[in-house]
């Protein structure tokens, strides 16, 4: 009891310590793990496992990054991830705050890997496709290659070889700057050609991949490509070359999980070569391992081969048992495919993508049409207002012109009236002056020098004619010319025969009879 109590106290103290004192070095450990995870996933996994209490050691954004890196490291070190559903939170977080498209792409991709391990292939397909969009945005060729390769795997599992082939080829193009990854993609491309019956193309891609693997010194990759070449040569009945490559693959292999696959390849090879003893050795090894395998497609291949072998030996009951197991596994595979069609998931995603594109184009066109309508209406309204303003200005100008014209007419009438009145007044005054001059002239002719009125008349003459007049006629004639300009000249021209006396009488008569006209 005392020991148990001590353990509980220590555990509580440690929990309190970690809760109150999160790791200060946690962020640097996560950064280092992120740098190592692609090329050295085992080292990255050790760093991830050394982070205690990550919920307290990181802020929310860094904790989401921790969840992605953790699943990434586990996936690359072949640890199970089907229960790592916390990564879905990271996926949602980074989708909502897409500041770094690469980490968002990783969150979607490894969420898809979790679904794939849970055998939810439709969801895995959707997540891989979405991850591809973010990887394209990030411009990360290596990540795009990884996504394309895994999309090819999903299609290949459901025997959709042409679609898988296109994805593997795409992965090889993205991996052009990454030789080892490119070699894996070339191997997958060759496998699709082989399954499709195009053996020449399969040989081409297998040899190309093997050359890269040998150049890089990657034994695991050499084992894989040698195995594929051995199978290709066996399918082409070139058993010597097939055996050479299959043995090379077996010797280079370091993965115990792959050993049953080597057993099956050797069993099929020796069956084709007619070596029943060697076939019996490898079928016996397959019998001990087949039931523990998790890959249903591989198990189905083993059961099918065992049923065929036992049938050829006449062991029909054993062959029937193997055939039943083969049928049972095949039904499981077909049920999985019927439940989850990656082809339909891919088509659905493509349809949604196209629909989204069409909707976006429609919205863009709709906005453009609205803008054009608004611009057109604005232009029409502006033009209408401009026309109305111009017409208003024109109308106002016409009103002003009318007013000015009326004012001008009124002024002209006033001016004419004024001139007429002035002329009449001047004419009247001049006529009165002329009449006065004539009367004074008559008085002068009648008043004698000794007449007492002579002084008064002289004074009057001074007033009428001025002090410097020569004679009365000149004064009279001057007044006449002022009243009737040019008339005296016309009379002279028309009646040159008149004497001076007759001319003066004529002038005086004209004034006495103003209505007389010489013109």
Image (cartoon, helix red, strand yellow):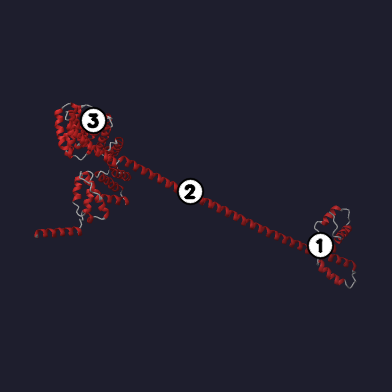
Q: Which residue is at the front of the view, 469 or 232? A: 232
Reading the image, the residue beneath label 2 is: 372
* Residue 107 in the image: above or below residue 259: below
* Mark 2 secondary-structure assignment: helix
Marked residue nearer the N-terminal end (3 or 2): 3
Q: Quadrant of the C terminus?
A: bottom right
Q: How far is disc 3 from disc 1 in space, using C-alphas?
A: 146 Å
Image coordinates for residue 472, horizontal then vertical, percent: 85, 64
The residue sitting at 36% across, 42% down in the picture is 351
Marked residue nearer the N-terminal end (1 or 2): 2
Q: How far is disc 3 from disc 2 in space, using C-alphas?
A: 64 Å
Image coordinates for residue 513, horizontal then vertical, percent: 86, 60
- Left or right: 21 as drawn, with respect to 436: left
* Residue 122 in the image: above or below residue 422: above
Reading the image, the residue beneath label 1 is: 479
Image coordinates for residue 404, horizontal then vertical, percent: 66, 58
Which label is found at residue 232?
Answer: 3
For the question of whether residue 203 can be seen, the reply is yes
Q: Quadrant of residue 80?
A: top left
């Amino acid at each position: 009891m005392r020991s148990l109590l001590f353990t509980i106290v220590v555990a509580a103290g440690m929990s309190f310590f970690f809760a109150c004192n999160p790791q200060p070095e946690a962020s640097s450990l996560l950064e280092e793990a992120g740098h190592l995870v692609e090329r050295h996933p085992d080292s990255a996994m050790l760093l991830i496992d050394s982070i205690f209490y990550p919920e307290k050691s990181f802020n929310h954004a860094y904790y989401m990054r921790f969840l992605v890196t953790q699943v990434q490291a586990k996936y690359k070190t072949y640890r199970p991830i089907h229960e790592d559903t916390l990564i879905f939170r990271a996926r949602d977080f980074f989708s909502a705050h897409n500041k770094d498209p690469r980490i968002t792409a990783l969150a979607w991709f490894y969420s898809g890997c979790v679904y794939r391990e849970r055998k939810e292939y439709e969801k895995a397909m959707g997540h891989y496709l979405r991850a591809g969009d973010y990887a394209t945005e990030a411009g990360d060729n290596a990540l795009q290659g990884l996504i394309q390769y895994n999309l090819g795997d999903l299609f290949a599992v459901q025997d959709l070889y042409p679609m898988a082939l296109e994805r593997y080829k795409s992965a090889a193009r993205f991996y052009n700057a990454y030789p080892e990854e490119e070699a894996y993609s070339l191997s997958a491309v060759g496998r699709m050609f082989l399954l499709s019956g195009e053996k020449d193309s399969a040989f081409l891609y297998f040899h190309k991949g093997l050359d890269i693997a040998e150049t890089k010194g990657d034994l695991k990759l050499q084992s894989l490509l040698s195995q594929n070449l051995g199978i290709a040569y066996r399918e082409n009945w070139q058993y010597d070359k097939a055996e050479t490559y299959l043995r090379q693959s077996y010797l280079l292999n370091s993965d115990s999980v792959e050993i049953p696959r080597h057993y099956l390849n050797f069993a099929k090879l020796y069956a084709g070569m007619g070596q029943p003893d060697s076939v019996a050795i490898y079928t016996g090894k397959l019998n001990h391992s087949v039931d523990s395998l998790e890959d249903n497609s591989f198990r189905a291949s083993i059961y099918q081969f065992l049923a065929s072998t036992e049938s050829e030996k006449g062991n029909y009951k054993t062959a029937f048992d193997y055939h039943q197991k083969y049928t049972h596994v095949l039904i499981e595979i077909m049920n999985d495919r019927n439940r989850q069609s990656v082809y339909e998931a891919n088509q659905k995603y493509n349809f949604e993508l196209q629909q989204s594109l069409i909707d976006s184009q429609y919205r863009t066109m709709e906005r453009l049409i609205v803008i054009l309508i608004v611009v057109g209406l604005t232009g029409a309204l502006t033009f209408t207002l401009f026309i109305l303003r111009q017409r208003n200005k024109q109308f106002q100008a016409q009103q002003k012109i009318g007013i000015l014209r009326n004012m001008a007419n009124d002024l002209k009438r006033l001016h004419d009236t004024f001139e007429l009145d002035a002329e009449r007044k001047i004419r009247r005054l001049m006529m009165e002056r002329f009449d006065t001059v004539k009367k004074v002239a008559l008085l002068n002719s009648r008043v004698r020098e000794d007449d007492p009125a002579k002084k008064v008349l002289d004074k009057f003459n001074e007033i009428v004619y001025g002090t410097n007049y020569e004679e009365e006629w000149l004064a009279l004639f001057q007044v006449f010319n002022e009243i009737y300009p040019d008339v005296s000249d016309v009379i002279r021209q028309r009646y040159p025969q008149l004497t001076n006396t007759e001319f003066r009488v004529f002038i005086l008569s004209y004034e006495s009879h103003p209505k007389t006209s010489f013109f």
